Image: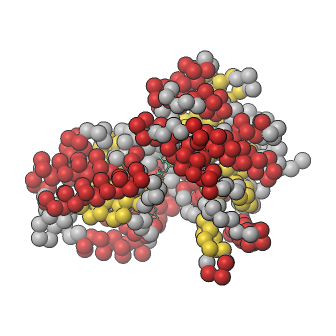
Amino acid sequence: MSPKSVVVVSNRLPITIEKMEEEQWVNHSSSGGLVTAMGPVLRNRGGKWIGWLGVQEMPDDTSLNNLLSRSAEELGYALIPVNITGEEIEKYYHGFSNEILWPLFHDLLSNCNFDPQYANAYRKVNRKFAQAIAKGTHEKDYIWVHDYLLSLVARELRKIGAQRQTGFFLHTPFPPLDIFMKLPWRFEILEAALEYDLLGFQTERDTKNFLGCVRYLLKLKATGRKNIKTIVTKKGEVHIGTFPISIDFKEFAKSAAAEDVTQEVKIIRQNHENRHLILGVDRLDYTKGIPHRLRAFAEALACYPEMRGEIELIQIVVPSRVDVSSYQDLKQEIEALVGEINGRYTTGGWTPVHYMFRSVSRTELLAYYRACETALITPLKDGMNLVAKEYCACNIDENGVVILSEFAGAAAELHHGALLVNPYDIEKVSRSIHQAFSMELDERRKRMKKLRESICRNDIFHWVNSFLGASVKNPNNGPEVDFFVPSP
Ligand code: GDG
């Protein structure tokens, strides 16, 4: 009998590919937290990753095979691509996933476009993922599916008669009943979710929201232990738990202390001598609350004149979905606000907002984390927000302040050390900016130490181990291999 291995399924594979001259395809490995965390679970243990390559034009068979075997060799596990057509990307990815589920799950109902055409494409692509799983994995493999784009995969697996043990982790928040009720496909999404064997959410609030929807809409009650609940459906048992995602804390702390980052920190400090630097880093997305943050920063300059000439906001916005018109509108709104603030307050030698619309290298990002006295992280809603955790891990001098939205998943863990704010409350955010600016070193240290200790304890390896650990609570359920990952 084949051994049980872990198979990760996500919309995107952990590599990106690009066509060079002479029709040659090249691959680059991605280096996100999930890829780092899953490496030790998959590598040399028969592990596999299933996902889309991110290109509409697929390489021909020979180039594709070469590319995948080269990548598999580098990563130490197999890659199985799912082919998605241009029209499917429009309707499944941009449509159902990003015009319906993404805004709905972030409580932003007015951003939803409930176009009925999108639902079929979503089902069809989830079916394609199920087919790739059925074809590319063993019956005894453990299938770990990620995120809102693939909520129907377990149901599709059953429909095509493929028996697999499955787990699902939702990286976004799960909305409260009042919001979820508005989804025209609410029963289908909930019922399909209950076809997984284990469902994981970022925070207790998300888990409670999900259980509340199941209780009200499907009349099913959860029972069981404190941290893992069980729901019995016609199909069997589903386990539900909270597993807050994290980062490779030690790796971030180590890289932040490295020479290249230290040099970069010096340059940033020289360019902003004697200033209190406040950092914002976000993908261009309306959930991140960038305009609200800029208004709060302007309010702080208006209310606390002693901070003028002393504080500077460095706002990095990473381009994302720039071909979507609402995202272009958001970019224009941000740029108009930056222009207004700078136009109003700039003096010779002092510019209040430094705005970058591009992604920065990892070295640069870590240097900004280290160089800035305060992180201003104010999403309107966020599954977790890894920037908050990365900022703390890189704050090796332990003197930074985190101002954090109470609607970021990270607030559940970081509320003891961070200054929590409601991002819609411009006055409160502005007061918190002033509080961070005036905070004594002793208090900053006390708060930052707490934050760092907690993130170090609950790192990404802890997250993987708790999810996979919960999947084996039932011995017939989870992977048999010794998959536990030691924190390096
Ligand atoms: C989803 C959920 C949840 C950002 N700019 C640059 C850069 N980054 C990296 C950061 C961080 C990541 O991107 C962003 O992570 P977030 O957690 O903030 O947000 P989402 O992308 O929205 O992710 C979220 C997450 O899934 C995990 O479950 O926390 O709530 O929405 O790692 O470092 N990296 C580099 N240059 C940049 O300019 N190199």
Q: Residue furthest top?
A: 219
Q: Is residue 132 left or right of residue 152?
A: right
**Could you tell me which residue is drawn at 42 percent across and 75 percent down?**
260
Q: Is residue 449 left or right of residue 345?
A: right
User: Residue 258's image quarter?
Assistant: bottom left
**Could you tell me which residue is drawn at 43 percent across and 35 percent down?**
109
Name the colouring of the figure. secondary structure
Q: Residue furthest right?
A: 1
Image quadrant for the C terminus? bottom right
Up/down of 417 relative to 221, above or below = below
Instruction: Return the x and y of residue 285 as percentages of the image width and height.
Output: 41, 51
User: Residue 392's image quarter?
Assistant: bottom left
Q: Residue furthest bottom?
A: 22
Q: Is residue 194 left or right of residue 431?
A: right
Whether residue 230 is visible to the viewer of this picture, yes or no, is yes
Pick the residue in front: 153 or 89. Answer: 89
Q: Is residue 179 left or right of residue 75?
A: left
**Could you tell me which residue is drawn at 71 percent across and 48 percent down?**
129
Instruction: Return the x and y of residue 421 as percentages of the image width and height.
Output: 30, 40
Pick the residue in front: 304 or 416. Answer: 304
Up/down of 221 relative to 303, above or below = above
Pick the residue in front: 123 or 191. Answer: 123
**Could you tell me which residue is drawn at 13 percent across and 60 percent down?**
345
Instruction: Return the x and y of residue 462 as percentages of the image width and height.
Output: 57, 47
Whether residue 482 is visible to the viewer of this picture, yes or no, is no
